Amino acid sequence: MRILSIDYGKKRTGIAVTDPMQIIANGLETVETVKLEAFLKDYMEKEEVETIVVGYPRQMDGEDSENMKRITPFVNRLRKLYPEKKVEMYDERFTSVLAHKAMLASGIGKKARQDKALVDKISATIILQEYLEHNKHFI
């Protein structure tokens, strides 16, 4: 079963997913946030997903960010829609910065680096990879 991560945004949402053995995180898609629930429903009808990890946006001081007022109701809907799946939140501080650094390191051109949808997908991948690394120590 896969683990799916979500970098929830006001306009766009980045999505990443693991391989079935839950070893590697891969960017899956960036979707318009208004179409997110339909995308997830369709994806989960095709693929077995065990856990949904939603990025938990915090400020540098640890306080919740402005986006939490949108994320909390979304996470509550996910828990009602998919009661058989584990829905967790995972700290997403610095993921956008790390996404930009990863893009620079990979040699992606300037125009591609300005593609916010790509940044969102990479951010979701970083959230998922960090979640996997964190939980590897507890197995």
Image: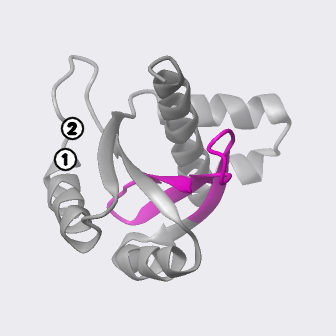
Q: Which residue is mark 2?
A: 65
Q: Which residues are magenta?
A: 1-29
- Residue appearing at x 83%, y 35% in the figure: 106
Check disc 2: other Cα within 10 Å, few if <14, some if 14-19, many if 20+. Answer: few
**Where 61 sits versus 102, above or below?**
above
Residue type, numbered disc 1:
Met
Q: Which numbered dot is residue 34?
A: none
The quadrant in which residue 40 appears is bottom left
Residue type, numbered disc 2:
Ser
- Residue appearing at x 49%, y 74% in the figure: 44
Magenta span contains residue 12 = yes
Check disc 1: other Cα within 10 Å, few if <14, some if 14-19, many if 20+. Answer: some
Q: Position of residue 32 (x, y in %)?
A: 45, 73
Residue closer to the observer: 120 or 125: 125
- Residue appearing at x 23%, y 57% in the figure: 75
Magenta span contains residue 106 = no
**Where 73 sits versus 127, above or below?**
below
- Residue appearing at x 73%, y 38% in the figure: 103
Q: In the image, 19: left or right of 53?
A: right
Q: Which residue is mark 1?
A: 68
Q: Position of residue 88 (x, y in %)?
A: 31, 44
